[in-house]
């Protein structure tokens, strides 16, 4: 039997056998480390709306924006381990931030436990509508000829995948690119829409709607395969920019010590929700690849991704700040 089908059958059984958490628990708080209006926020609200019905309790999204998810992670660490608080996040906060910040205020292995994963995604490079650029090669030439090889590229958080990509692109094409950090993707996109910054890097879910509307243009994506939602956009691998083949993940984490019964029930509910046709379609439209992961699978994915980034960060010469 296919692994995903086995997991879904187990999820259905878990939901049926663990009703105790559903009725007498306080509202479930889902922390989001970025401002309202961004990709992670939209995903959190979509899932929360469906999870409340399966769990039989209120699911409230709480934005704790700042420092690339660091504030939300610190909030999770200090939350009661009673099944009332979760953190929805992608790779940056869990796998990368602890390696680039001297004192992040949390240790994922010591302070958190994986609850369940639900998707993978890719980052992408986009240009504002105010530029004449239609492709990545045109962007490179535009910076060289119109800006004397210098330009700023917006990123949703400092010391993140996008910042390392900005550095690698600059080295690869002999450009003087400066990574301009924002507090999340929403303010970055706002500045790109206002033509305050000519380019930005973020996740496909952050940029795809404005790309479809013609307000921004996604000109390259990470990974080794083109995205189904962006079939005409080449990968950086095709363009010769190597080293970013590992795909980021999305998942839920809880404070260490959270009851195993709650983790099992929530993971089961999450697996069921992301396979709902309307939810799966919306996540796919956002640019995600739905990939239900058990707590154990998410833990392995997180550890592997962390190890890959340890190598990338070490080779870059970046020093924790």
Image: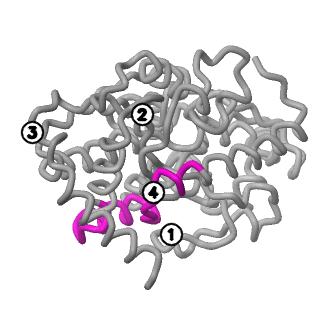
Along the line of sight, the residue nearer the viewer: 45 or 12:
12
Q: Secondary structure at mark 1?
A: loop
Residue 94 falls in image quadrant? top right
Task: Work out whether residue 132 can be spotted.
Answer: no
Q: Nearer the viewer, mark 1 or mark 4?
A: 4
Q: Residues within 10 Å of mark 3 (few under 14, many from 20)?
A: few
* Labels 3 and 2 touching (C-beta < 8 A): no
Q: Residues within 10 Å of mark 1 (few under 14, many from 20)?
A: some
Left or right of 36, for residue 228: right
Q: Nearer the viewer, mark 1 or mark 3?
A: 3
Label number found at residue 23 = 3
- In the rendered view, how is the structure colored? one colour
Marked residue nearer the N-terminal end (1 or 4): 1
Residue matched to label 4: 294
Label number found at residue 230 = 1
Q: Position of residue 183 (x, y in %)?
A: 50, 25
Q: Nearer the viewer, mark 2 or mark 1?
A: 2
Q: Report the span colored magenta.
A: 274-299
The stretch drawn in magenta includes residue 296? yes
* Labels 2 and 1 touching (C-beta < 8 A): no
* Labels 1 and 3 touching (C-beta < 8 A): no
Residue 141 falls in image quadrant? bottom right
The stretch drawn in magenta includes residue 41? no
Give the residue drawn at x 82%, y 65%: 240
Give the residue drawn at x 70%, y 53%: 139
Q: Secondary structure at mark 2?
A: strand
Between the residue at mark 3 and the residue at mark 2, the CA separation in whole angstroms equals 20 Å
Left or right of 314, for residue 262: left
Left or right of 306, for residue 122: left
Residue matched to label 2: 254
């Amino acid at each position: 039997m296919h692994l995903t089908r086995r997991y879904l059958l187990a999820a259905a059984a878990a939901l049926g056998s663990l009703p105790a958490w559903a009725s007498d628990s306080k509202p479930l708080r889902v922390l989001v480390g970025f401002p309202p209006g961004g990709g992670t926020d939209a995903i959190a609200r979509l899932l929360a709306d469906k999870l409340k019905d399966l769990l039989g309790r209120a699911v409230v999204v709480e934005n704790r924006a700042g420092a690339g998810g660091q504030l939300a992670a610190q909030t999770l660490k200090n939350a009661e381990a009673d099944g009332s608080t979760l953190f929805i996040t992608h790779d940056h906060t869990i796998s990368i931030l602890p390696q680039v910040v001297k004192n992040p205020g949390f240790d994922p292995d010591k302070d958190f436990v994986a609850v369940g994963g639900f998707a993978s995604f890719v980052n992408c490079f986009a240009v504002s509508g105010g530029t004449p650029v239609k492709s990545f090669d045109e962007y490179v030439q535009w910076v060289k000829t119109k800006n004397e090889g210098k330009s700023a590229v917006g990123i949703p958080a400092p010391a993140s995948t996008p910042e390392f990509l900005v550095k690698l692109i600059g080295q690869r094409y002999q450009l003087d690119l400066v990574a301009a950090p924002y507090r999340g993707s929403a303010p970055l996109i706002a500045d790109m829409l206002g033509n305050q910054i000519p380019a930005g890097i973020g996740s496909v879910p952050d940029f795809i709607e404005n790309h479809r509307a013609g307000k921004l243009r996604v000109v390259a994506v990470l990974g080794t395969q083109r995205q189904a939602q962006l079939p005409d956009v080449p990968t950086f691998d095709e363009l010769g920019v190597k080293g970013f083949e590992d795909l980021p993940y999305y998942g839920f984490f809880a404070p260490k010590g959270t009851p195993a019964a709650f983790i099992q029930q929530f993971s089961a509910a999450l697996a069921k929700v992301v396979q709902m046709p309307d939810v799966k379609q919306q996540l796919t439209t956002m640019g995600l690849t739905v990939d239900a992961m058990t707590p154990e699978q998410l833990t392995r994915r997180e550890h592997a991704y962390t190890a890959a980034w340890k190598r990338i960060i070490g080779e870059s010469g970046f020093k924790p700040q």
